């Protein structure tokens, strides 16, 4: 065991300074988010974010450049350390394991890191809206967006709009149609639907139904929710609460 | 008073099941509620804004603090009136003479086709502040207060207090109480003819004509506790622990969460 030489102390000092800068810029962002009312303009948020990201980069460079030194360092209290009065700091310094909260952060970061790695492309991306465990990758999303409007339009043109069922479905027999609805849709050929809201609902559902059918060409995207979750709310909770608070329409 | 709450969105297909689950959990039958909610928006600063003179007795510092408190923000506030299913769909305007002659409840209840009488509608004023920011606890906590208003037309009184009528809607839902937590599973209904009127409605359309705000018919689940003394950390903590307990119990069914603070922003911009 040897004492540190000047260079090594300098390295430690540099790391400290960079960390101090990072905490400062984080604190200033948190401060401006908490106190700014209305929120600061996005340009300033963005510049703060880029400062933080620069700081993070420099910290991480510093740490990886001096990895050899930093990983071999051991902290121990000197004889003149005021252990009686500064016990908490001492304990913090002598900790070998991370704080449980920090441990959570680290594992979350690791997870995000591994998730972000490119995964082998699957032939069909059967991502149900309610699944939520895996997001579409950039290219899959782009593909979906390129595919969806054309396909939806094509599908829509083939149909004579109005009513709850399509001709095909009626020919097949409307009992066999999987609408995903627990409530029974009325067929207006059998009798005019009486409740207006029901009809409104029906139209919305039909759109989902149309999208649900596999397109003639291209990829199949499972857009419509599964049977298990027939209808997910369209309007997010936030907007409903906002409407209830201020009357603003979502 | 402080209100601590947790929210969840409940898809319509889960509604029936959840009602049964809640009835089992709370060991009570749901209490069905229908409420008219009128939204009002403050248009002028209340209090000291226009006052001159007679302020010598107040210290400069006090005055400033008071002014700041009174003129800090303008808020949206709600006027809520409970209605019943029979109130909907009544078209007959109540006759002025019979109303004058004797408006006993007995007489009103006696007629099977009871019609809605706006003049006798009871109201309460509910104010809620924007939820507190930066609290450690994962519940939505906000300052609230509630007061009864005189029956009948509230718009005049509200105007006099500096509030304009913005819009109104109806909330339909079921209420449970469990462990001091009120659990309200509800959704918003709109009037079929839109919200163009700048006065609250005198008549209510038939309930089945009301349209849903959320077209799929999903519900909002709100679990809340009202704490009388919000400055008492101990009771606030107990309240949020009760809420967390409920959240754990309901976890397999729905996930109760803190609401987005800005979506509950009652400040008028």
Image (cartoon, coloured by chain):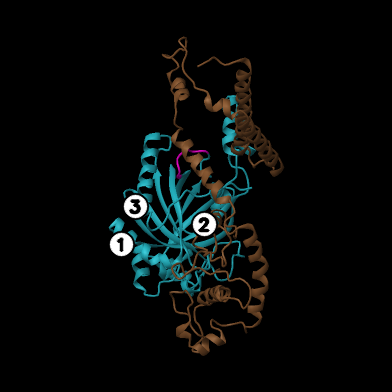
Chain colours: A brown, B cyan
Which element is circle 1 on?
loop
Residue that mark 1 sits on: B29
Query: Is residue B3 within the magenta segment?
Result: no
For the residues labelled 3 and 1, the Cα–Cα distance comes to: 18 Å
Q: SS for tag 3?
A: helix
Callout in the foreground (3, 2): 3
The span picked out in magenta is B134-139
> Is there any visible trace of residue B231 in the rendered image?
yes
| Residue for badge 3 | B249
Please check the rendered image and state whether residue B137 is part of the magenta-colored stretch, yes or no.
yes
Label 1 Cα crowd, 10 Å radius (few <14 / some 14-19 / many 20+): some
Predominant secondary structure, magenta span? loop
Residue B86 screen position, x and y as percent: 41, 70
Is the residue marked by circle 2 packed among few (<14), some (14-19), or many (20+) residues within 10 Å?
many
At numbered mark 2, what does the secondary structure look like: helix, strand or loop?
A: helix
Q: Residue at x 46, y 74 (%)?
A: A181
Instruction: Tell me the residue that label 2 is attached to.
Output: A237
Residue displayed at 56% across by 87% down: A167
Answer whether labels 2 and 1 touch (C-beta < 8 Å): no
Specify the farthest residue to the left: B27
Indicate the chain on which mark 2 is placed: A
* Of marks 2 and 1, the one in the foreground: 2
- The quadrant holding residue A49 is top right
Q: CA distance from mark 2 to mark 1?
A: 26 Å
């Amino acid at each position: 065991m040897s004492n540190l030489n000047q260079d090594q102390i300098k390295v430690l000092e540099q790391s400290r300074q960079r960390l101090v800068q990072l905490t400062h810029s984080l604190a200033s962002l948190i401060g401006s988010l908490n106190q700014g009312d209305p929120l600061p303009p996005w340009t300033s948020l963005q510049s703060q974010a880029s400062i933080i990201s620069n700081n993070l980069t420099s910290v991480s460079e510093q740490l990886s450049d001096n990895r050899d030194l930093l990983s071999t360092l051991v902290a121990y209290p000197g004889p003149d350390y005021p252990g009686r009065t500064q016990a908490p700091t001492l304990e913090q310094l002598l900790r070998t394991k991370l704080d449980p909260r920090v441990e959570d952060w680290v594992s979350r970061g690791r997870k995000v890191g591994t998730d972000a790695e490119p995964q082998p492309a699957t032939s069909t991306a059967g991502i149900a809206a309610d699944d939520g465990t895996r997001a579409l990758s950039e290219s899959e999303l782009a593909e979906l967006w390129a595919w969806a409007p054309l396909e939806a339009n094509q599908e829509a043109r083939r149909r004579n709009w109005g009513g709850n069922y399509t001709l095909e479905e009626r020919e097949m027999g409307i009992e066999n149609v999987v609408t995903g609805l627990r409530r029974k849709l009325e067929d207006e050929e059998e009798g005019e639907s009486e409740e207006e809201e029901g009809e409104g609902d029906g139209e919305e559902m039909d759109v989902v139904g149309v999208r649900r059918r596999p397109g003639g060409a291209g990829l199949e995207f499972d857009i419509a929710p599964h049977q298990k979750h027939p209808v997910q709310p369209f309007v997010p909770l936030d907007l409903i609460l906002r409407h209830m608070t201020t009357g603003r329409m979502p | 008073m402080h209100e601590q709450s947790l929210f969840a969105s409940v898809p319509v297909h889960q509604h029936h099941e959840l009602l049964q689950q809640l009835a089992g959990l709370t060991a009570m039958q749901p209490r069905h509620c229908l409420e008219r909610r009128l939204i009002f928006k403050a248009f002028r600063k209340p209090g000291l804004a226009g006052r001159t003179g007679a302020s010598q007795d107040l210290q400069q510092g006090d005055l400033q603090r008071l002014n700041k408190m009174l003129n800090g923000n303008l808020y949206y506030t709600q006027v809520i009136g409970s209605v019943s299913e029979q109130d909907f769909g009544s078209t007959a305007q109540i006759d002025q003479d019979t109303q004058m002659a004797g408006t006993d409840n007995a007489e009103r209840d006696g007629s099977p086709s009871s019609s809605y009488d706006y003049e006798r509608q009871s109201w309460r004023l509910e104010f809620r502040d924007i939820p507190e920011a930066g609290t450690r606890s994962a519940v939505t906590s906000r300052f609230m207060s509630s007061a009864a208003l005189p029956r009948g037309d509230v718009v005049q009184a509200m105007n006099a207090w500096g509030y304009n009528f913005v819009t109104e809607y109806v909330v339909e839902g079921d209420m449970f109480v469990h462990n001091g937590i009120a659990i309200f599973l509800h959704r918003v209904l709109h009037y079929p003819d839109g919200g163009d009127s700048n006065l609250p409605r005198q008549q209510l359309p038939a309930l089945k004509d009301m349209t849903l705000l959320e077209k799929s018919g999903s519900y909002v689940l709100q679990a809340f506790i009202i704490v009388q003394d919000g400055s008492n950390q101990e009771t606030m903590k107990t309240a949020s622990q009760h809420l967390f307990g409920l959240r754990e119990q309901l976890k397999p069914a729905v996930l109760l969460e803190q609401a987005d603070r800005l979506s509950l922003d009652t400040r008028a911009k």
